[in-house]
Image: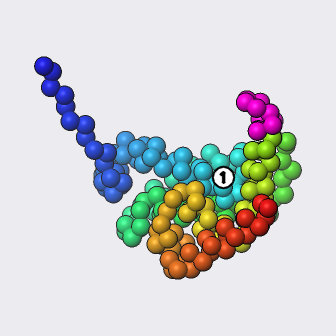
Amino acid sequence: MAQTQPVAAPMPDAALIAAWQRGDEQAAAELVRRHARALARFLAGAGAPAADLDDLVQETFIRAFRAVGRFRGQCQFRTWLLTIGGNVLKDAGRRRARHKVVPLEDTLRTPDGDPYEQAVAGEVEGRLGEGLGRLPRMQREVFLLRAQQGLEYDEIAAALGTSAGAARVHYHHAVKRLKEYLQ
């Protein structure tokens, strides 16, 4: 009977950060692998143009790795990374505002499945995106961190520099406004 080797538990983010600081490039690659998709979802939900998403994710990781020595572990690494991503997105928005660009039309989605269901889903998705765009910045960010990323209110508070109670209030108002908008 062959003996199976126990599967090693994945290294926690803090251990990967320490390994990267000691020069282990694979540790940095693992941090990117773990968190890039969630970061991209957060940025897209916060209004990042799809064409800029890869660049924004890359810029976020560049800034995070440059500043990793200042990460003190008061929150999860992902929460800290999403905070940096939000700042990268704000900076990109300021640059865009200074340089008006007329975007080319996006290509149409490929038709898969029932056309009626796709149309309804596309309409709801569009209305939700519009509704998110109409929310004040703090409500939008709290909503995305809670609903999309599944963060707890204390983590959201740490990421956005507010209190857990204020994060709850912002989330409540965001949900209320989105429901009103979607009706």
Residue 59 in sight in this render: no
The residue depicted at 31 percent of the width and 48 percent of the height is 11
The residue depicted at 15 percent of the width and 21 percent of the height is 2
Outermost residue, top side: 1
Let me know if residue 45 is in the magenta part.
no
Q: Residues within 10 Å of mark 1 (few under 14, many from 20)?
A: some
Let me know if residue 112 is in the magenta part.
yes
- Quarter holding the N terminus is top left
Instruction: Give left or right: position of 15 versus 155.
Output: left
Q: Quadrant of residue 144?
A: bottom right
Q: Quadrant of residue 128?
A: bottom right
Q: Position of residue 116 (x, y in %)?
A: 81, 37
The residue depicted at 77 percent of the width and 60 percent of the height is 182
User: What is the magenta range?
Assistant: 108-118
Does dot 1 land on a helix, a strand or a loop? helix
Q: Quadrant of residue 91?
A: bottom right
Instruction: Give left or right: position of 101 versus 6.
Output: right
Looking at the image, residue 177 lies above or below residue 21: below
Q: Amino acid at mark 1?
A: Ala
Residue receiving disc 1: 44
Outermost residue, left side: 1
In the foreground, 124 or 144 = 124
Looking at the image, residue 114 lies above or below residue 2: below
Residue 122 in sight in this render: yes
In the foreground, 143 or 58 = 143
Q: Position of residue 31 (x, y in %)?
A: 42, 48
